[in-house]
């Protein structure tokens, strides 16, 4: 395969952008940051760094998505953010950016490709995670569960299943409902609940056809509000430079999916336990840990995120803990001021997904009308809307509106079928 090459025009545009950012900032301009991907949390990273006076180079393959229409940062096209073109693009930038330029990935596959080329990149760039095999073990569910169990965390009973034959072998040990998750990150789904053996067998068969091994785990009771998390930036010396605790309010799909809304929330000793677990393994950089259960002292371990930013990154920032800036200062040796005191000023929500899930929760009586009203009147910050950078939100409105209609129709139809 031929290496992917930036054009001379692209590299010259990068140089011109960095020179323009440096103009008027004195003898030493801030080191730029490289953000991989303009998903919604990549957008937050870009806005946040630029507003701290940091030049941002954003590498993306899809500039048609609404969040890519930001006015901030300098955009660089790369056809594949999960393969060799990404590495080729970064290596081409070495001559244009200073040593110790940090890279901020936004999904696990980016982390994997950066990890595979760690030694090739780390002489010039700074990555927010350690070299070696640890991160791979932490993103593979069976290995993660063993590490967490060995460290004394309360891990739900789990089985590794890759075929119907393996499922049949543990059939008598299963207690329904169960949670089903891909053993590897970024597969065809995030998580599902199966209420009986027939539903579980159908999922195992479908995943086997896609060569996706599964983790089948005992179900932990509670709705989305019982999913708690701690988020951290841990320096290479083990010093935790920033930490934040919160919980989900809404997920899409409900109960098993990605965050659609979160709030600042005190998870008690679980916040320190998560940090101690990660540091004890030698993990540092951008990371988070999830638990499920209420009260927090009875919550059980679910999973970790390591080496990258995720949906929690904006929830932390709008509530007083700027984890990206803690990472930037540590990786570059800078000392730029940033917020690092947790508040509970805002709910973070992704309006595209939050309102349909809220409607579903009300229709299915997971939430009371009082719960819904309380949610609606609380101050919020949206994943896309920003009055200083409104275009990403405006681009999302048509598809968001049509999506609302379709989602609400499906929710109402399913509810009527079950009650009819």
Image: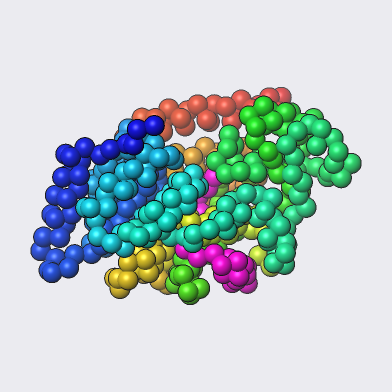
The image shows residue 387 at horizontal and vertical percentages of 27, 49
Rendered residue at 77%/46% (across/down): 159
Rendered residue at 20%/48% (across/down): 14
Q: Quadrant of residue 210?
A: top right
In this rendering, position of residue 262 left or right of residue 183: left
Is residue 148 found inside the magenta-colored segment of the image? no
* Pick the front one: 202 or 340: 202
Rendered residue at 23%/47% (across/down): 74
Q: Check the image and tell me how it is coloured.
A: rainbow
* Pick the front one: 330 or 100: 100
The image shows residue 13 at horizontal and vertical percentages of 17, 44
Q: Which quadrant: the N terminus?
A: top left
Is residue 260 found inside the magenta-colored segment of the image? yes
Q: Quadrant of residue 147?
A: bottom right
Total numbered labels placed on residues in the image: 0
- Magenta highlight range: 258-285
Please, is residue 277 above or below residue 310 in the view?
below
In this rendering, position of residue 404 left or right of residue 98: right
In this rendering, position of residue 28 left or right of residue 346: left
Please, is residue 265 above or below residue 78 in the view?
below
Rendered residue at 19%/64% (across/down): 29
The image shows residue 338 at horizontal and vertical percentages of 33, 69
Q: Which quadrant: the C terminus?
A: top right
* Pick the front one: 263 or 114: 114
**Residue placed furthest toward the right:** 172
Q: Is residue 347 visible?
A: no
Q: Is residue 187 visible?
A: yes
* Pick the front one: 354 or 78: 78
């Amino acid at each position: 395969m031929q290496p992917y090459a930036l054009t001379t025009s692209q590299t010259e545009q990068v140089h011109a952008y960095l020179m323009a950012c440096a103009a008027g900032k004195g003898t030493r301009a801030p080191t730029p940051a490289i953000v991989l991907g303009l998903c919604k949390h990549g957008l937050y990273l870009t806005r946040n760094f630029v507003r701290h006076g940091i030049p941002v180079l954003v590498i993306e393959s899809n500039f048609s998505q609404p969040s890519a229409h930001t006015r901030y940062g300098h955009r660089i096209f790369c056809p594949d953010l999960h393969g060799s073109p990404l590495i080729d693009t970064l290596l081409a930038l070495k001559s244009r950016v200073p040593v110790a330029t940090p890279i901020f990935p936004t999904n696990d596959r980016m982390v994997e490709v950066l990890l595979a080329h760690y030694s090739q990149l780390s002489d010039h760039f700074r990555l927010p995670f350690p070299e070696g095999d640890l991160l791979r073990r932490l993103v593979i569910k069976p290995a993660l569960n063993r590490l967490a169990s060995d460290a004394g965390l309360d891990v739900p009973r789990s089985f590794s299943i890759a075929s119907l034959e393996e499922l049949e072998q543990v059939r008598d040990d299963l207690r329904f409902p169960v949670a089903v998750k891909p053993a590897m990150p970024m597969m065809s789904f995030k998580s599902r609940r199966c209420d009986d053996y027939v539903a579980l067998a159908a999922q195992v068969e479908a995943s086997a056809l896609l060569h996706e091994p599964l983790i089948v785990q005992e179900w932990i009771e509670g709705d989305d509000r019982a999913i708690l998390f701690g988020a951290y930036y841990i320096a290479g010396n083990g010093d935790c430079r920033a930490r934040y605790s919160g919980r989900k309010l809404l997920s899409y799909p409900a109960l098993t999916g990605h965050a659609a809304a979160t709030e600042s929330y005190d998870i008690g000793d679980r916040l320190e336990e998560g940090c101690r677990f990660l540091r004890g393994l030698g993990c540092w950089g951008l990371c988070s840990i999830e638990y499920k259960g209420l009260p927090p002292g009875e919550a059980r371990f679910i999973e970790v995120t390591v080496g990258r930013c995720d949906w929690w990154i904006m929830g932390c920032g709008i509530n007083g803990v700027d984890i990206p800036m803690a990472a930037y200062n540590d990786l570059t040796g800078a000392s730029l001021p940033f917020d690092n005191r947790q508040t509970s000023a805002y709910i973070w929500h992704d309006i595209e997904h939050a309102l349909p899930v809220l409607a579903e929760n009300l229709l299915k009586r997971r939430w009371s009308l009082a719960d819904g009203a309380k949610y609606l009147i609380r101050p919020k910050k949206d994943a896309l809307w920003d009055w200083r950078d409104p275009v990403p939100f405006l681009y999302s409105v048509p598809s968001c509106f049509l999506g609302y209609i379709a989602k609400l129709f499906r929710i109402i139809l399913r509810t009527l079928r079950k009650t009819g």
